């Protein structure tokens, strides 16, 4: 289960691509891959909305022709700006994600003959209209995409957004950056903030983990680590940064002032105080 065959990236899965395997792959993909690659794999996930580089498009000709072992190796070892996920995903889960990626690729180019008897083949633009979604909801580089050929799934694409011209060598200016770390922590503020760490964790996973990772380790130098951030910069600095965002950052950090209540900020800070 290495992805290699005869010294080259292989094309075979180590087990059958059953519906159960594909559903497990979809679940893992949506958690670990979709933030960057989007749920339909077009490389326009949520981090692109934050101004980060667009991730790889699984529908590109290069990746459509790539062997399955290539995806397994990239998930295991990382590639370019993408970190490895060998600690987050077991080998079996990595292969399940690989199988699901191939299913995504096939589904976006499916013909009637490829589908199960009675299955509907529809373009994303058609699905958008039928489901009453906003015009342009399914816009992407491949709006003629089709639905997955196995049941129990749905797909969508997001409108492309221009990514900021970010440089991987630039230091971030938000929380955890050298500039932020130079601020003297407000000792009184650190101890006075009340909040629910459990609620804060859910807020973090829903809004922050897409960039700073589920374990808060970040992806330096692009996304700084938030481990021990309350001790480093103080709760006041965290609250201010999350409220105002860092529009000049590379990539920019959005403001959450309109999304978080005062209690939400307290809960998030309470969570950030906990140890990973």
Image (cartoon, grey):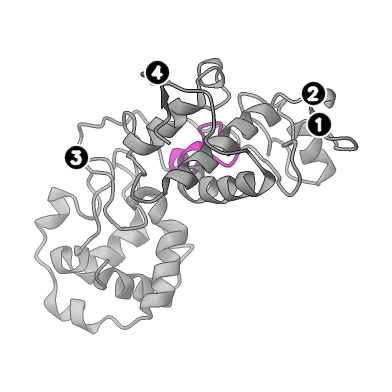
CA distance separating discs 3 and 1: 49 Å
CA distance separating discs 3 and 2: 47 Å
Which residue was labeled with disc 1?
A: 115
Give the image quarter of residue 188. Answer: bottom left
Which residue was labeled with disc 4?
A: 6
Closer to the chain start, of discs 4 and 1, is 4
User: What range of the chain is rendered magenta?
Assistant: 36-49
Q: Nearer the viewer, mark 2 or mark 1?
A: 1
Q: Nearer the viewer, mark 3 or mark 2?
A: 2
Instruction: Residue lying at the far front in this picture: please name it.
Output: 6
Asked if labels 1 and 2 touch by Cβ distance under 8 angstroms, the answer is yes
Which residue was labeled with disc 3?
A: 171
Judged from the image, the secondary structure of the residue bearing numbered disc 4 is loop
* Quarter of the figure that contains the C terminus: bottom left
Which residue was labeled with disc 2?
A: 111
Closer to the chain start, of discs 3 and 4, is 4
Give the image quarter of residue 171. Answer: top left
Residue 62, image x, y percentages: 51, 16
| 227 lies left or right of 158 | left
CA distance separating discs 3 and 4: 42 Å
- Can residue 255 be seen at all in this image of the molecule? no
| 235 lies left or right of 111 | left
Which residue shows up at 28% across the image and 44% down it? 219
Closer to the chain start, of discs 3 and 2, is 2
Count the marks: how many? 4
Residue 140, image x, y percentages: 62, 29
Asked if labels 4 and 3 touch by Cβ distance under 8 angstroms, the answer is no
* Mark number displayed over residue 129: none
Tag 3: Cα neighbours inside 10 Å, few (<14), some, or many (≥20)?
some
């Amino acid at each position: 289960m290495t992805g290699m065959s005869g010294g080259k990236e292989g094309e075979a899965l180590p087990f059958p691509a059953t519906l159960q395997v594909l559903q497990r792959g979809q679940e893992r993909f949506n958690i670990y891959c979709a933030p960057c690659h989007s749920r339909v794999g077009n490389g326009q996930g949520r981090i692109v909305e934050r101004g980060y580089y667009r991730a790889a498009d699984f529908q590109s000709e290069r990746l459509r022709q790539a062997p399955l072992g290539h995806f397994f190796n990239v998930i295991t070892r990382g590639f370019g700006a993408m970190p490895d996920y060998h600690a987050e995903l077991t080998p079996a889960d990595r292969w399940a994600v690989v199988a699901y990626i191939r299913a995504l690729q096939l589904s976006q180019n499916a013909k009637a003959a490829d589908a199960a008897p009675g299955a509907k083949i529809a373009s994303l633009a058609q699905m958008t209209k039928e489901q009453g979604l906003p015009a342009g909801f399914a816009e992407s580089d491949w709006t003629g995409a089709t639905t997955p050929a196995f049941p129990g799934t749905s797909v969508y694409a997001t409108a492309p957004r221009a990514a900021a011209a970010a440089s991987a060598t630039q230091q971030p200016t938000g929380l955890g950056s050298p500039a932020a770390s130079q601020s003297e922590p407000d000792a009184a503020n650190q101890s006075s903030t009340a909040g629910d760490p459990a609620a804060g964790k859910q807020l973090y996973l829903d809004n922050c983990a897409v960039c700073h990772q589920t374990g808060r380790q970040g992806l330096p130098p692009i996304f700084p680590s938030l481990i021990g951030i309350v001790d480093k910069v103080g709760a006041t600095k965290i609250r201010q940064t999350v409220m105002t965002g860092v529009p000049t950052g590379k990539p920019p950090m959005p403001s959450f002032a309109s999304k978080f209540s005062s209690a939400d900020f307290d809960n998030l800070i309470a969570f950030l105080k906990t140890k990973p």
